[in-house]
Image (cartoon, helix red, strand yellow):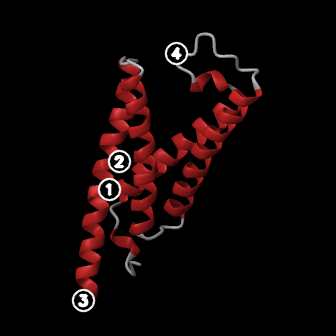
Amino acid sequence: MSAHIDNVPKWVRIAVGILALINVAYGVMCYFDMSMLYHAGTGVDLTNSFIKNASYEFASRNLAIGLALAFVTIIKGAPEALTILTIVRALIEVQTIIQSVVQANISAMLLIPVAFLALEIFIVKTLIGVIKKEEALQN
């Protein structure tokens, strides 16, 4: 684990903090309005208990990832923790992109996860550089 947590650029912490807030907000909003999860959900019965439980699971996953990112950002956690949590968030974006492509639901709404994924890849690349720099300083 890194000893020098201040080597993480401020813009990375701000960007990760914004991503965390987006995840928390999305998770909370999905609890109250499940239709947000189903972009092309014509005919989806939102009163079905299975659909409700699956929606709540998805919302809680986003909420948990957002809270973890926020917590690590606020306490100025180690770059390794920020990297792992950002990779987890990026995997969700990959899942969204794959689902959209498989369902042939390619629209302007696909640009949002693609933009977030690009930002997350750039953040992870930056954090890996910080981790390598810190390891070099320790040796």
Position of residue 72 measured from the top left corner of the image (x, y, whole percent): 52, 63
Nearer-N-terminus badge (1/3):
1
Q: CA distance from mark 4 to mark 2?
A: 26 Å
Which numbered disc, 4 or 1, marks the residue closer to the eye? Answer: 4
- Between 18 and 78, the residue placed more toward the observer is 78
Quote the CA–CA distance across marks 1 and 3.
23 Å
Find disc 2 in the rendering and name its residue.
Answer: 120
Q: Position of residue 62 (x, y in %)?
A: 57, 43
User: N-terminal of the two: label 4 or label 3?
Assistant: 4
Query: Could you say where residue 67 lies in the image, as x and y percent from the top left?
Result: 59, 53
Nearest to N terminus: mark 4 or mark 1? 4
**Residue labelled with disc 3:** 139
Picture quadrant where residue 99 is located: top left
Contact check, label 4 and label 3, Cβ < 8 Å = no
Q: Where 56 sits versus 84, above or below? A: above
* Circle 1 Cα neighbour tier, 10 Å, few/some/many (<14 / 14–19 / ≥20): many
Disc 4 versus disc 1: distance between alpha carbons? 31 Å
Mark 3: which amino acid? Asn
Amino acid carrying label 4: it is Ala
| Disc 2 crowd, CA 10 A, few/some/many (<14, 14-19, 20+) | many
Point out which mark residue 40 bears.
4
Q: Is residue 83 above or below residue 47?
A: below
| Total numbered circles | 4
Q: Which residue is mark 1?
A: 124
